[in-house]
Image (cartoon, rainbow, N blue to C red):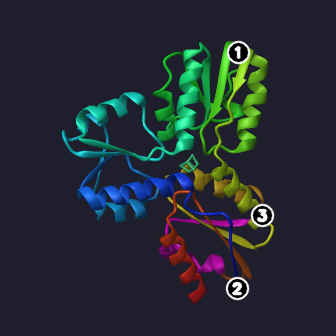
Amino acid sequence: MNLVVASPTGLCFGVRRAIERLELALAEYGTVHSLGSPMHNPQEVARLDGLGLEVIERASDMPEGEVSFVRAHGIARSEYEELERRSRLVIDGTCPHVSVAQSRAESLSKEGYSVVIVGDSNHPEVRGILGYIDGQSRVIPSEAEIDGKIRYGRLGILSQTTQRESSFASVVSKLVLNAGEIKVYNTICGATIERQKSIRRLAEQVGGIIVIGGRNSANTRKLVEIAESLGVSTMWIEHSGELDRGWLEGKRSIGVAAGGSTPDWLIKDLKCKLQTL
Ligand code: SF4
């Protein structure tokens, strides 16, 4: 069996940076409180739990005088301010690309634009970006969800950083017809685009693709969707223990791709297991 690993794949710059900051803080302070899960990978979160990570659900749950951590996906401005009030130190792991999306949203709102975020309204990153908007805002997941009856005077559009380019482009091109004035910021991050391109290249070379990453990871789900849309048999697993031997049978060439929040050790473990098979 030939094994081909997508390139680039796995941890993106923003999540790697956040993990490194969190590990340093855990080594120095012992216990660190993250507002929300620090990343969408249960196995990596469990590893960090073992080093002293505590996850809190609300900024108001932050114990006074302790060390807090802001995940790569970012949080709302009001939550950040609450953490600053309660913590002796805030370690900011917000990915710089997410910070750009937050400041774009804030400036559009201050300039009087209604703001549309193309993305998933339940995703923590999108909820965080919404927390930087004072005026009107909407989250639109796809072209199909656009209400053609709504007219906008001044419309500002940006994207969740992990959005598919084609989906963002189709929402923008449809909304153009509904607004008097439009300002668009493409805030899809390069890491996402590169990983989506790499799985397309991989799909041309192999008979099946294993995508490894958290089931709660939006960018991992998008990789799975892309592979499936290209007609390649695709298996989504969180760790090597979920490998289905039956699926592997008869495939002479297998591709491996990993979401942007999948740590190196999980990919290495999967490669070892596949090689032993
Ligand atoms: S996917 Fe992009 S925006 Fe999101 S954390 Fe990674 S590098 Fe940052």
In this view, the mark in front (3 or 2): 3
Q: Quadrant of the C terminus?
A: bottom right
Q: Which mark is residue 262?
A: none
Which percent across, then down, holds residue 214?
50, 59
Q: Residue furthest left?
A: 64
What range is drawn magenta here?
A: 231-248
Q: Which mark is residue 201?
A: 3
Q: Is residue 200 left or right of residue 33?
A: right
Of the numbered discs 1 and 2, the one sitting upstream in the chain is: 2
Image vertical order of residue 81 relative to residue 218, above or below: above
**Residue picked out by circle 1:** 149
Name the amino acid type tagged 2: Met
**Gap in Å between the C-alphas at discs 3 and 2?**
19 Å
The picture quadrant where one finds residue 49 is bottom left
Q: Is residue 4 left or right of residue 12?
A: right
**Gap in Å between the C-alphas at discs 1 and 2?**
54 Å
Whether 125 is among the magenta residues is no
Image vertical order of residue 225 relative to residue 74, above or below: below
Taking the spot 52% from the left edge, 15% from the top edge, the residue there is: 135
Nearer-the-camera pick, 269 or 80: 80
Which percent across, then down, holds residue 161?
60, 42
**Gap in Å between the C-alphas at discs 3 and 1?**
40 Å
Is residue 215 something that shows in the picture? no
Q: Are circles 1 and 2 on residues that touch, CB within 8 Å?
A: no
**Residue picked out by circle 2:** 1
User: In what element is the residue under mark 1?
Assistant: loop
